[in-house]
Amino acid sequence: MKVQKLIRDVLLVEWFRGLSVTFRTMLKKPVTRLYPHVKRQPFPGFRGRQALVRDPDKLKERCIMCLRCKTVCPSNCIIVEVGKDENNARVLKNYSIDATRCIYCGYCVEVCPVNAIVLTEHYEYLGDKRSDLFFTKEKLLSNWDEFLANYPGDAYFNKFWRPPGMPEKMLTPQKRNEKPIEIKKKNEEIA
Amino acid sequence: MGSMEIKDIKEQILTSQNVCILPETEEDLETKEMILNMGPQHPATHGVLRLVLKLDGEEIVDMEPHIGYLHRGIEKLMESKTYAQALPLTDRLDYISSPANNTAYAIAIEKLFGIEAPIRAKFIRTIFCEMSRICSHLLWLATHSLDIGAMTVFLYCFREREWLLDLFEMTVGARLLTNFARIGGVRCDISPEFVQGLREFTKVFPSRVQEYETLLTKNPIWLERTVGIAQISAEDALNWGLTGPCLRGSGVDYDLRRDCPYDAYPYVKFHVPLGKNGDVYDRYLCRMEELRQSNEIIKQLLDQLPDGQTVADDAPDLVIPTPPRQVEAAGSVASAFITLSKERKMINTGDLYSAVEVPKGELGIYVVSDGSGKPYRLRLRTPSFVHISAMPVLSIGHMVADIIAIIGSIDIVLGESDK
């Protein structure tokens, strides 16, 4: 036993065994990507940049000012301003998200009864100033347009609008019946 | 001109009497104890841990850990959030195994509310717990071996960890801060692609663990650095409140997954690895075996995965109504709110302690509820905090270089200890 150990120590058996593993890995394909040149498409439902959904028919935001997103937000980063128009009806004056405070939990997307808000799969965004990351209503809508313009598929549906596995009765009718938003049709309309 | 100046200086040094003090007595020859401040910005302290070491030469005479550089007041913050809103905060405790923390919190609050998650949700939660255990142990192995000097293992571990993080992203849309569980179930059901991807992982993973072991387990350098370092007896480990692999490395057979099973652990069979000597090497062996056991658990769970919904029917909505807390005001107002929430059969008053085996040890959650939608007090018993307090016992008598191995072997995350 001791002799065996001595031979092993002298011949560096364990060392060569370890080096054989590293040598074998050298012959394999690398697992890394050259990031700015090669990009991986994020998985559907990735929680990235915030956006307000532009309704394909009305071409404006879907929000109905129920304030559920504002109530559920753990970091209080959603600001909703509700005003009244000349007919005394409620209108959305402003809707802003402070992206520097947002923790990307996705609760707002899940509780919204009309699927008006979404965390898009877009993740490469930055700002030189804090105000660049303070998204107002116009910025949130343009985020949505920008995201759809670069989206590779034909139709878009966010996973958290109707989380898989959730019982039907816990969802609002609009969430239950939501169809994927078709992208090509919308682009034609704008053109 | 320059050479003249240097010559002058040399002469000054030679003639000066203050430059060199010759030892006159034996006391002058003794080494003085030195206080060395290690951290908080030190790459090997795994975050922002500050250690004040008292050294006699290279040997550690005394040491005092200082924590709190990553304190965010999570416990206090939770008192101002509803039960659902406090869940994302648990991600930020042990940020390399978020799903396990989420599950621990969800189980505690489910017990408080008196609801039970559906069986499929329990299975999915357990699968994610075990995946996060593998993630956490891989990151531990990567950094621990890098600290000691084995760089290759670091790269290999990140290769497998990336695979699991992709699977997390596939299901819940986030890689690290998953916010995965939900009071009364999970937020998203898993897809067939996920099951297929995880099956491929479980097939490949044992051979990968074998690779790491080939590089380390019998490596003479590794043995020199780990065997016999930071030994702690079973009795001491129990007295210091160590849990998880640190306790099992000393030979104490204690695992919450088997001893008081929660979620889907009653449905699986697994073996709890134990060490003998309680040194750095035994803790390493324990964790390596746990990697294999976690892989086996995932396999068994995937085979038995039942169908059904993933959120309980009586699970509370994410928007939990919160009546204003008026405990000091007129009693009738406060009681009116409490009866209101009781009628909805949502929130019970009272307190409870619930503990779960997270990768680092035992994560206990003690919650006091006053019937409003927010916890009155929420105390987190985090394993890293307890483990750091045992650092002096482990390290006194060892060399400065061993501190690195000891910090690595107790597997601390400062986000968890500072809260």
Image (tube, helix red, strand yellow):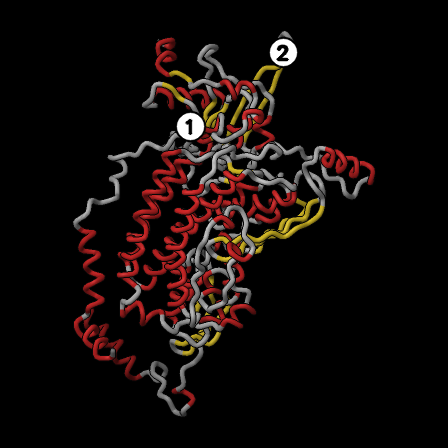
Is disc 2 surrounded by few (<14), some (14 to 19) or many (20+) residues within 10 Å?
Answer: few
Query: Distance of mark 2 from mark 1, alpha carbons?
Result: 31 Å
Please tell me which residue lies in front, B194 or B34.
B194
Q: Secondary structure at mark 1?
A: loop
Q: Is residue B369 visible?
A: yes
- The residue wearing badge 1 is A120
Name the chain under label 2. A
Amino acid on which disc 1 is placed: Thr
Q: Picture coordinates of residue B366 (x, y %)?
A: 63, 52
Q: Is residue B145 above or below residue A10?
A: above
Q: Which residue is pictured at 49% across the width and 39% down the height?
A: B180
Count every numbered label the image shows and give the total: 2
Classify residue B338 by image quadrant.
Answer: top right
Q: Residue A89, which numbered label?
A: 2
Please tell me which residue lies in front, B69 or A129.
B69
**B357 horizontally vs B324: left or right:** left
Q: Which residue is pictured at 56% across the width and 69% down the height?
A: B239
Q: Earlier in the sequence, mark 2 or mark 1?
A: 2
Q: Is residue B64 above or below residue A87?
A: below
In the rendered image, the quadrant that contains the N terminus of chain B is: bottom left
Classify residue B219 by image quadrant.
Answer: bottom left
* Mark 2 or 1: the one toward you: 1
Q: Residue A184, which numbered label?
A: none
Q: Which residue is pictured at 30% across the width and 34% down the height?
A: A40
Name the chain under label 1. A
Please tell me which residue lies in front, B221 or B347.
B347
Q: Which residue is pictured at 63% across the width and 49% down the height?
A: B378
